[in-house]
Amino acid sequence: MKTNLLALALLASGLALIAGCASDHGAYAPQNTIVNNLETSSSFVLFDEGAQKSVTCDGLEPQRLPDGRLQIAANLRNRENRRIQVQLNCEFKDAQGFVLDSTPFENFFLDENAQQGVTFVSMNDKAITYTIRVRQAR
């Protein structure tokens, strides 16, 4: 009796294992690779609706320092009639768009309807492109 139950249990688990493997389709292709892909094509991105409503960038000025590092000067504008706090960082990328180094997010205060500049400098001379990223401070 015990051998019959053992054989039945082994048979049931074997069938469950085979049925589980039969439904596997292998690897899947990524979906919507173009949607929400702004960071690869834009030099300035806003992460949330609050930042989108409050902040704009009037100008970006990249330049090479004498030691080859990339320096980015950005001119940010507060679009609101109140003082705001945002956080920003810069990701420096190679020619293919891979991130080489990234600055930490830092708090940045903009007065009412003010325009203010901020500067970022890459850590090495390999940076070709960049993306400045802005989000609301929480």
Image: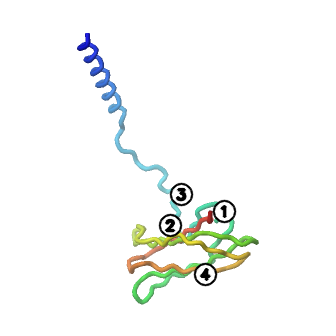
Relative to 48, residue 8 above or below = above
Q: Position of residue 59 (x, y in %)?
A: 60, 79
Specify the quadrant that holds the N terminus: top left
Residue tagged 3: 36
Q: Position of residue 32 (x, y in %)?
A: 49, 52
Residues at circles 2 and 1 in contact by the CB criterion of under 8 Å? no
Q: Residues within 10 Å of mark 4 (few under 14, many from 20)?
A: some
Sequence-wise, which precedes: disc 4 or disc 3?
3
Sequence-wise, which precedes: disc 4 or disc 2?
2
Identified at 47% across, 71% down, the residue is: 91
Task: For marks 4 and 3, give the one nearer the viewer.
Answer: 4
Residue tagged 1: 50
Residue tagged 4: 117
Say which amino acid is labelled 4. Gly
Task: For marks 2 and 1, give the one nearer the viewer.
Answer: 1
Q: Position of residue 116 (x, y in %)?
A: 64, 80
Task: For marks 3 and 1, give the one nearer the viewer.
Answer: 1
Residues at circles 4 and 2 in contact by the CB criterion of under 8 Å? no
Disc marking residue 41:
2
Inter-mark Cα distance, 2 to 3: 11 Å
Task: For marks 4 and 2, give the one nearer the viewer.
Answer: 4
